[in-house]
Image (cartoon, grey):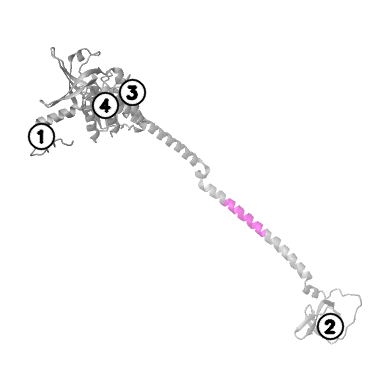
Amino acid sequence: MQDGAPAAPANSAEQPYPVRSVAIKVAQWIDRLGSIWVEGQITQINLRPGTRTAFLVLRDTSADMSLSVTCDPDLIRKSPIPLQEGSRVVVYGKLSFFTGRGTLSLRVIEIRPVGIGELLARIERLKALLAAEGLFDARLKRPIPFLPTTIGLITGRASAAERDVLTVARNRWPAVRFEIRNTAVQGPTAVSQMLEALAQLDRDPAVDVIVLARGGGSVEDLLPFSDEALCRAIVAATTPIVSAIGHEPDNPLSDLVADLRAATPTDAAKRVVPDAAAELAGVRDMRARSAAALRGWVDRETRALTQLRSRPVLADPLREIDRRREEVERLRASARRNAEQFIRTEATATRHLREKLTAVGPAATLARGYAVVQRVAGTERHVVRTIEDAPAGSQLRIRVADGAVAAAALGTKSLGAQRPTEDTETRRS
């Protein structure tokens, strides 16, 4: 509030604004907006002969909103491209709020029809934007169910696309069910209606796949299917979506963001619904191939079993045991013979060694006439080897072959250099 300016009266239930004040304030706020450029689609043209004002209704292409427009009739009559209901235009004008009626209107002084070239350029720019965001990435594509129980169908009412999808799908699989949402598929209300139908079908848990179908058309007719809001709604949906616009030369952007693109509505029905006859034929073929494979496996295993049974070890299992028993008996006999031969050999060697030991042993020596002379000194006995060991008077013990003789040494006599044959033995006289 500026210094010295009167304070605005407080607004309350006791001090309400009159309608005129509110209308004037709204008119002032709107007037501050100034002149603006606005884009939309003409849905209504009221051009009466002799009048100085033409009335139009300009509708948003992506939302259910419209705006009243007034202009000089010459702007419509002299347009380089004929304007009609459904034309996309860009207008330049100033908003006005009529306080008497409480209505808002846009007074335009310039109207520029949006040509096909500009529309295509806008679609290309939007396409580049969506591609940069990754909305065309194949990894985002959801798989189409093999046999959907319920198919959601968004298409025009009583259209050829609806008839083609229903006819082909039911011919292929009679039990298939449809949830149909008839919407506008061209014009200013198409996008909003398709968005609402798409949201309804996506929320329905019984719907397994959604088909967006239209039987082709001009570039202008297919503009709703390249709308940014519709493309983003298709990507955000949780249910797989098939785009079947049926327009090959200029594919709308919905074909690129959808999980599956079908060339036509008929093609969509073929790709979403399996052919019952073909599936049954496939099942029969697989059953026949499985049976043939099983029979072949059984035949191979039977032949292998027959070959195993024909082998000697299985044809006569005891034969190998008998052969092994005979071999064991042969080995046992051979081992016994070898052991007996070894024992005989060792016994002979032992006898020979015993005979040698007996021949050189003391007993044998004594038996040949030798004797062993021992000097007795108390309890000790020492073998007499020289005459010094038995001086005269020594007590002697003479061992012979059959006993011992007690004697005494009477004296000694040296034999000179001659040495006795045995040191410990002397021949008996």
Find residue 91 and report its horizontal and vertical position in percent: 23, 20
Q: Element type at marker 4? A: strand
User: Residue 374 versus residue 193: which sits nearer the camera?
Assistant: 193
Q: Is residue 271 left or right of residue 335?
A: left
Q: Earlier in the sequence, mark 3 or mark 1?
A: 1
Q: Earlier in the sequence, mark 4 or mark 1?
A: 1
User: Residue 393 versus residue 314: which sits nearer the camera?
Assistant: 393
Question: Within the magenta stretch, is there residue 240?
Answer: no
| Quadrant including the N terminus | top left
Seen from this angle, which residue lies furthest left? Answer: 14
Q: Earlier in the sequence, mark 4 or mark 2?
A: 4
The secondary structure that dominates the magenta segment is: helix
Instruction: Find disc 3 in the rendering and name its residue.
Output: 124
Identify the amino acid type marked 2: Ala
- Vertical arrangement, residue 164 with respect to residue 80, above or below: below
Circle number at residue 362 = none
Q: Element type at marker 2? A: loop
Circle 4 packing at 10 Å, graded few (<14), some (14-19), many (20+), is: many
Circle 3 packing at 10 Å, graded few (<14), some (14-19), many (20+), is: some
Instruction: Find disc 1 in the rendering and name its residue.
Output: 17
Instruction: Find disc 2 in the rendering and name its residue.
Output: 390
Disc nearest the viewer among 4 and 2: 4
Question: Which quadrant of the figure has residue 139?
Answer: top left
**Which range of residues does the magenta coloring cover?**
325-340
Identify the amino acid type marked 4: Leu
